[in-house]
Image: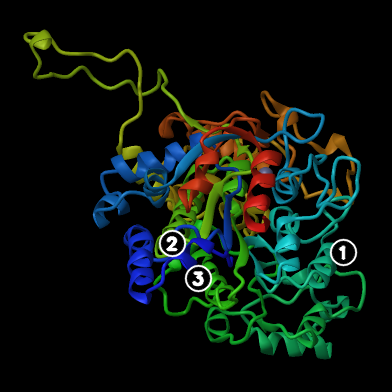
């Protein structure tokens, strides 16, 4: 931003001018490495999909109270907490147009464009007209742009910044939109929408070529209905295409397309357990984000970047507290990196928020396993013990939740890998007991298996047959995704042991947090209750005005 300051013409000597400049600029330099009136050059939005305040409470309780908390061991607080101290926080409501609840597509459309959107619609306003997104406005200004997600890069949250389609499920069309949009850096999962249909033939040339290029680390499977090879198209537009952590690290140039998984990337538990493993070829969210910032920050005009921690939501749909905790930690590690990058400068607005809450999660007290009476040192307990009426949950539960070894989704996959005849309640209990700290009985295994397994039957915009939905005891209608019905039943079986309850298999309209860090004159706005359309519009104004 260049401004004329006619007042300087009044000072004749160079020395005087130097003194004035020092006087004006020095205090700013002491507070910020760059002049405080330089304006906002970069906007980074981190979307923790499905992270309502209750999910924040899980991360916070784990960090502060788990006897073996990794945060306590490292002597630090969560990055999220540090950001609330360094920045400005507010509340966000997020319902889609004309309804009470939102999905991720409408919510992301609303904050990417500032326009109201219909649920499941992507990058279009409530009437169905294409929106103009903050990413597109950044492009018009010559800024670099990036999208990072640990789900598929064509999934609702990232796609809402760079695609315009009537329904979020149209990921083949979304991939084309995103490529046409010329987003400089795209990193995530979802290779299957970028490679030609012929790649499904294991004997085809393209299958062999892709197997080689992905070093056999990414399953080659296509969901495309046509022969378009979007990787090749991307390369001809100047993208470097990468498929492993090492290829990502070595990628040069200003445009990078990284697809590290056929669909979603590995879950948070996997990422935690494999973080230090030398054989890991899949990057984690922090590594993808660091690379994106490295590439985008080369542009002197600045950049826009959206990073999605997208599987907090998936764990919420599965009602899987252990996986959700690890997703939150993956998110927080990423935030820790970005926050310290943003702190080293004063030209960046960093926004952290969620698109909605998933699962209606919460710790809760119960009448199960009520603790024994015990002594307390205070005067009022001289000569008498205190006997709680209820079980308010002990801190040890947090360590046990952290110690889960497999997500509920992968527990079920392991079960289905057994020969049909061995898919028994006892086998279900055995797999759960080997991979979680909350043992269940064979009888409880039977409760999980009492509902039929479902295929994932979403096809196009419609669920094919409502009758295939199994009946569970209550709230049936809120369990809408195939196999989640069984993961949700695992959650119910272990609920009393975890002191954890869930109210739904979908989303709630619970308010979500928003935290902004950056120049104070820009961030002070966020101290309010805003709708996704409002803060989205504000972020766009900050970047483009
Ligand atoms: Mg999402
Ligand atoms: Zn969701």
Q: Which mark lies nearer to you, 3 or 1?
A: 3
Tags 2 and 1 touching, CB below 8 Å: no
Quarter of the rendered structure image containing ligand 2: top right
Q: Nearer the viewer, residue 344 or 505?
A: 344
Q: Which residue corresponds to mark 1?
A: 173
Q: Which residue corresponds to mark 3?
A: 290
Question: What color scheme is it?
Answer: rainbow
| Alpha carbon distance from label 3 to label 1 | 28 Å
Secondary-structure class at tag 3: helix
Q: Nearer the viewer, residue 544 or 170?
A: 544
Q: Is 504 positioned to the left or the right of 115 in the image?
A: left
198, above or below 424, in the image: below
Residue 113 placement (x, y as % from top left) = 75, 49
First-in-chain label (3 vs 1): 1
538, above or below 378, in the image: below
User: In the rendered image, which quarter is residue 485 located in?
Assistant: top right
First-in-chain label (2 vs 3): 2
Residue 30 visible in the picture: yes
Residue 39 placement (x, y as % from top left) = 54, 59
Tags 2 and 3 touching, CB below 8 Å: no
Q: Residues within 10 Å of mark 2 (few under 14, many from 20)?
A: some
| Alpha carbon distance from label 2 to label 1 | 33 Å
Label 2 near ligand 1 (CB < 8 Å): no
Q: Residues within 10 Å of mark 3 (few under 14, many from 20)?
A: some
Residue 72 placement (x, y as % from top left) = 26, 50
Q: Is 206 positioned to the left or the right of 359 in the image?
A: right
Q: Which residue corresponds to mark 2?
A: 272
């Amino acid at each position: 931003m260049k401004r004329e300051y006619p007042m300087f013409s009044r000072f004749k000597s160079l020395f005087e001018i130097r003194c004035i400049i020092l006087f004006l600029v020095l205090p700013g330099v002491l507070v910020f490495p760059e002049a405080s009136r330089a304006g906002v050059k970069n906007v980074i939005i981190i979307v923790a999909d499905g992270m309502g305040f209750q999910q924040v409470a899980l991360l916070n309780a784990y960090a502060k109270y788990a006897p073996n908390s990794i945060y306590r061991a490292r002597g630090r607080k969560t990055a999220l907490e540090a950001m609330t101290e360094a920045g400005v926080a507010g509340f966000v409501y997020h319902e889609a147009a004309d309804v009470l609840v939102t999905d991720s597509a409408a919510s992301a459309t609303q904050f990417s464009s500032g326009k109201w959107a219909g649920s499941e619609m992507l990058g279009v306003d409530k009437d169905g007209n294409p929106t103009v997104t903050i990413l597109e406005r950044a492009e018009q200004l010559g800024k670099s742009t990036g999208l990072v997600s640990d789900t598929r890069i064509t999934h609702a949250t990232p796609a809402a910044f760079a695609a315009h389609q009537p329904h979020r499920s149209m990921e083949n069309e979304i991939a084309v939109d995103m490529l046409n949009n010329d987003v400089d850096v795209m990193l995530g999962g979802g290779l299957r929408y970028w490679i030609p249909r012929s790649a499904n033939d294991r004997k085809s040339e393209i299958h062999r070529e892709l197997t080689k290029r992905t070093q056999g680390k990414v399953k080659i499977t296509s969901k495309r209905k046509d022969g378009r090879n979007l990787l090749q198209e991307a390369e001809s537009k100047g993208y470097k295409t990468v498929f492993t952590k090492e290829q990502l690290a070595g990628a040069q140039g200003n445009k990078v397309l990284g697809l590290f998984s056929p669909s979603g990337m590995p879950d948070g538990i996997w990422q935690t357990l494999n973080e230090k493993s030398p054989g890991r070829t899949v990057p984690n969210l922090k590594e993808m984000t660091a690379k994106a910032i490295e590439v985008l920050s080369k542009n002197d005009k600045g950049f826009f970047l959206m990073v999605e921690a997208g599987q907090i939501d998936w764990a919420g749909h599965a009602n899987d507290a252990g996986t959700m905790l690890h997703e939150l930690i993956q998110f927080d590690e990423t935030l820790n990196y970005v926050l310290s990058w943003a702190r080293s400068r004063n030209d960046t607005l960093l926004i952290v928020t969620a698109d909605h809450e998933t699962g209606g999660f919460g710790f809760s007290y119960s009448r199960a396993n009520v603790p024994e009476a015990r002594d307390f040192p205070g005067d009022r307990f001289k000569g008498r013990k205190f006997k709680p009426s209820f079980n308010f949950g002990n801190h040890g539960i947090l360590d046990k939740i952290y110690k889960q070894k497999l997500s509920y989704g992968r527990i079920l996959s392991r079960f289905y890998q057994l020969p049909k005849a061995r898919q028994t309640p006892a086998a279900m209990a055995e797999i759960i007991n080997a991979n979680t700290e909350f043992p269940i009985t064979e009888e409880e295994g039977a409760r999980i298996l009492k509902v039929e397994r479902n295929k994932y039957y979403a096809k196009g915009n419609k669920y094919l047959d409502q009758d295939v939905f199994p009946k569970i005891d209550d709230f049936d209608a809120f369990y809408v995704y195939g196999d989640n019905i069984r993961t949700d039943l695992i959650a119910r079986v272990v609920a009393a042991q975890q002191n954890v309850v869930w109210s739904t298999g979908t989303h709630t309209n619970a308010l979500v947090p928003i935290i902004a860090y950056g120049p104070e004159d820009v961030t002070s706005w966020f101290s309010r209750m805003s709708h996704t359309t409002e803060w989205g519009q504000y972020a766009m104004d900050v970047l483009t005005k």
